[in-house]
């Protein structure tokens, strides 16, 4: 199995919905941050990549046909080079709505516990992109918009889909060359759903030592 779809969009741009959609369309399994939670060795591999160590991307993503969300979105250029036949999908969202969503969910804490492998990995793979200023609206939105523009400039147009998951199946299926399913496009992981699912984990991570 080799990677056939690379997601370049940041977290909270509909990446979990896209993961489920890709898997329904036959491009699974699809790697997402949720997979990092399941594999104790995964944070170390992504941390090594963030530290500039040599990475065998085929090994890191072994068993996956596609990848979306962080941590892989940080390395979309490296992945696009390692898998030259893979198509790239940039999930986008209104910047202000995206920022508000991050503050209520994934950026609600600083990820600064260096003794926790997952937090250390997120700090390097995600936090560094924003100079660790995850609550600074202007900084976070500036990085978000610059990233999206860089993806558009870096990836050839015939290889790239700039995609809002609210557009539904049609542009996604046309880009991937597959039929449109009769079932509705997956729509999951709203802010409310995220907080419901992760409330206990977030409380534990924010508890005093």
Image: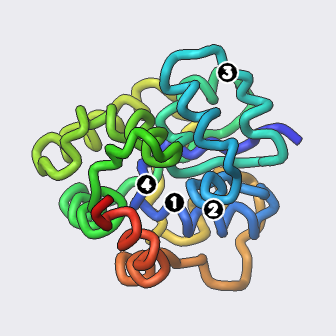
Residue plotted at (74% across, 64% down): 23
Percent across and percent down for residue 148 are 35, 39
Q: Residues within 10 Å of mark 3 (few under 14, many from 20)?
A: some
- State how far apart marks 3 and 2 are (Cα): 23 Å
Q: Residues within 10 Å of mark 1 (few under 14, many from 20)?
A: many
- Between 94 and 30, the one lying in front of the other is 30
Closer to the chain start, of discs 3 and 1, is 1
- Between 166 and 61, the one lying in front of the other is 61
- Between 172 and 64, the one lying in front of the other is 64
Q: Answer above or below: position of 168 versus 98.
A: below
Q: Which residue is mark 1?
A: 15
Residue plotted at (38% across, 54% down): 92
Which SS class for mark 3? loop
- State how far apart marks 1 and 2 are (Cα): 6 Å
Q: Which residue is mark 2?
A: 19
Q: Which residue is mark 3?
A: 55
The reply to whether discs 1 and 4 touch (Cβ–Cβ < 8 Å) is yes
Residue plotted at (33% across, 32% down): 128
Percent across and percent down for residue 53 are 58, 16
Q: Which residue is mark 4?
A: 11
């Amino acid at each position: 199995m080799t990677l056939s779809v690379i997601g370049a969009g940041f977290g909270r741009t509909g990446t979990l919905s896209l993961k489920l959609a890709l898997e329904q369309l036959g491009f699974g399994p699809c790697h997402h941050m949720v997979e990092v939670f399941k594999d104790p060795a995964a944070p170390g591999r992504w941390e090594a990549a963030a530290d500039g160590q040599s990475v065998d991307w085929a090994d890191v993503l072994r068993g996956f046909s596609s990848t979306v969300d962080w941590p892989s979105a940080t390395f979309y250029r490296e992945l696009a080079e390692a898998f030259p036949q893979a198509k790239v999908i940039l999930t986008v969202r209104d910047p202000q709505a995206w920022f508000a969503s991050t503050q209520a969910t994934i950026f609600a804490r600083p990820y600064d516990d260096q003794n926790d492998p997952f937090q250390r990995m997120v700090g390097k793979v995600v936090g560094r992109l924003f100079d660790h200023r995850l609550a600074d609206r202007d900084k976070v939105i500036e990085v978000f918009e610059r990233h999206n523009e860089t993806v558009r400039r870096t990836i050839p147009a015939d290889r790239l889909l700039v995609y809002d998951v609210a557009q539904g199946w049609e542009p996604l299926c046309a880009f991937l060359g597959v039929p449109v399913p009769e079932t509705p496009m997956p729509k999951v992981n709203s802010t409310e759903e995220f907080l419901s699912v992760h409330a206990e984990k977030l409380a534990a991570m924010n508890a005093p030592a």
